[in-house]
Amino acid sequence: MQWGWDWNPVTVKRWRLFRRMRRAWWSLWILVALYAVSLGSELLCNNTPLWVRFEEQVYLPILKFQPEDTFLKNGRHTRPDYKKIAQTPAFTSNPRNRMVFPPIPFGPLETTDPSSITLPDAVILTFKPEPRLATVNLSRDGIIMKAVDTEFFFGVSPETLPGQSFSKTWPLPPPLRNALDSRWRNEAAPSFSVVVSSSQPVPREAELCLSEFTPRSSPPSTVRITLRERDGLPGAARGKVALNEHLEVVSSTFPLWDSLSPETRTSLIALAQARLAGPTEDRSITLNHTPYIITATRSEVSWPYKPGSGHWMGTDSAGRDVLARILYGLRTSMTFGFLLVAMAMALGTLLGALQGYFGKNIDIIGQRFTEIWSAVPFLYVMILLGAVYGRGFLMLLLCYALFNWIGISYYIRAEFLRLRHLPFVESARALGLPHRTIIFRHILPNALVPLITFFPFYLVGAIGSLAALDYLGFGLPPPTPSWGELLAQAQQFRWAWWLILYPALALFVVMLLGVFVGEGIRNAYDPRPRTKFE
């Protein structure tokens, strides 16, 4: 008596062909390994310890829930915060008490304590040229009646400007003249600005601004124009100076730092010292006849926070570890994909088999129903059902499966139409076998090629669709770990590069591995021999 599975020779040949394609073979095992790792996410990423010894008692919180009262004796039977319990005197008083956390001691829903992130004691002084501002009051005939801080724009002191023509130095374009006329006519006018250039006293560019005007009891005699320097003084130095906790310069990109006077440098170091103690206001100084705004900044914990010690992929907008959410999101995506493809293929196979086997009116009615159903807008149905019944994993799975079976039903129908008149099917009918047996035991095993070859591609499509729905906000409800939800955060916080890099990389790798596996299966089932032209 022989034990074991009696494999079909054709199946064995296809399996060997698949194994010869190394890219597909290794992609399959990598994909299986990634999914297996994600199934054990609680053992790798979790804020619940794997093992606890407390007062000579051993607990396994990862397997059995332990209330807070077990450790603190406070009468609370709620979920404990083990990290805080490990710091309480009740736990630290006994040196034999121990907690063993997973390698990544952060859960996918845990908000990181900002105090747990160590920041460098460094201050960065940012030097930015401050655009100059000036105001001029013009009369109806364009004569300057009053001037404030206009020396940079006109090259002379403000006291000498009254009585001179404004257009002698700065042109008044027609749109600006129209805006001025409406104010002199005492008509309501919105704020207005225009950029103009002047060659006197030196070539410069300024923005002329008018504030919003509201009619008064009598027309104004003068209108105030604000002149704003464009993009700072051309050629003005910019840069940053970094100082450590000892107020020593670590790095400098500001070319004027070494040429500063001792008094100015002392005042700036005092600003950095004050910033180490707490927030400070910006300071304005003049260097080389150029006004500067100096901002003292220090690294602070704000969400999302960049990758660093403890959080290898950073945190998201709620302070949750990105690596933990990517790992749990892998399990969610793969599980959703497998279940969706299994349900869609089961439904598509059943409907396609019935149409292809019986034909005639059943086939016609089934085809018309499929065409009508395929025209129903899936996204609108998802939004409606989500608003009525709420979003959830099961609801999303069922709704998506109701629309995802259409493609595979066409292939199964075509296979049944091809196989139903072959001799082995006719022989089964002649023996009096029921339709159920002929469909599922005789025809379906010979029509599995489309199911097997399309399975990896359907899986990749399901994973991508879930990420897209989560990105749009119509997928899994928050705070479910999801790659699409992380990508949606990346759109909001565009400076947080880790929110776009790591989720996109994970999605790309999984989908690429699935495509490689599908390509290998398709080539293994291809009956045509492969040739190479030289």
Image (spheres, rainbow, N blue to C red):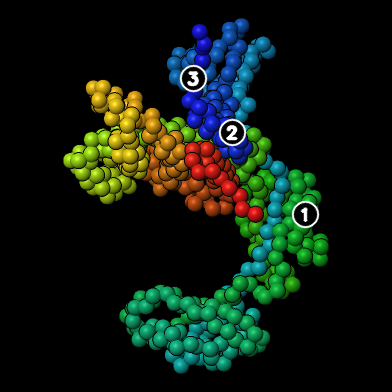
State the SS at label 1.
strand
Q: Which residue is located at x 66 percent, y 48 percent?
A: 298
Where does label 3 land, which residue?
A: 6
Q: Which residue is located at x 59 percent, y 80 percent?
A: 205
The residue type indicated by label 3 comes to Asp
Is the C-beta separation of discs 3 and 1 under 8 Å?
no
State the SS at label 2.
helix
Is the C-beta separation of discs 1 and 2 under 8 Å?
no
Q: Residue 348: horizontal and vertical position, in percent? A: 32, 37
Where does label 2 land, which residue?
A: 19
Q: Which residue is located at x 35 percent, y 83 percent?
A: 186
Query: Residue 295: in sight, yes or no?
Result: yes
Is 334 positioned to the left or the right of 271 in the image? Answer: left
Instruction: Of the two numbered discs 2 and 3 on the same chain, state the one appearing first in sequence.
Output: 3
Q: Within 10 angstroms of label 2, few (less than 14), some, or many (20 or more) residues?
A: some
Single out the mark in the foreground, 2 or 3. 3
Q: Residue 490: horizontal and vertical position, in percent? A: 51, 49
Residue 191 quadrant: bottom left
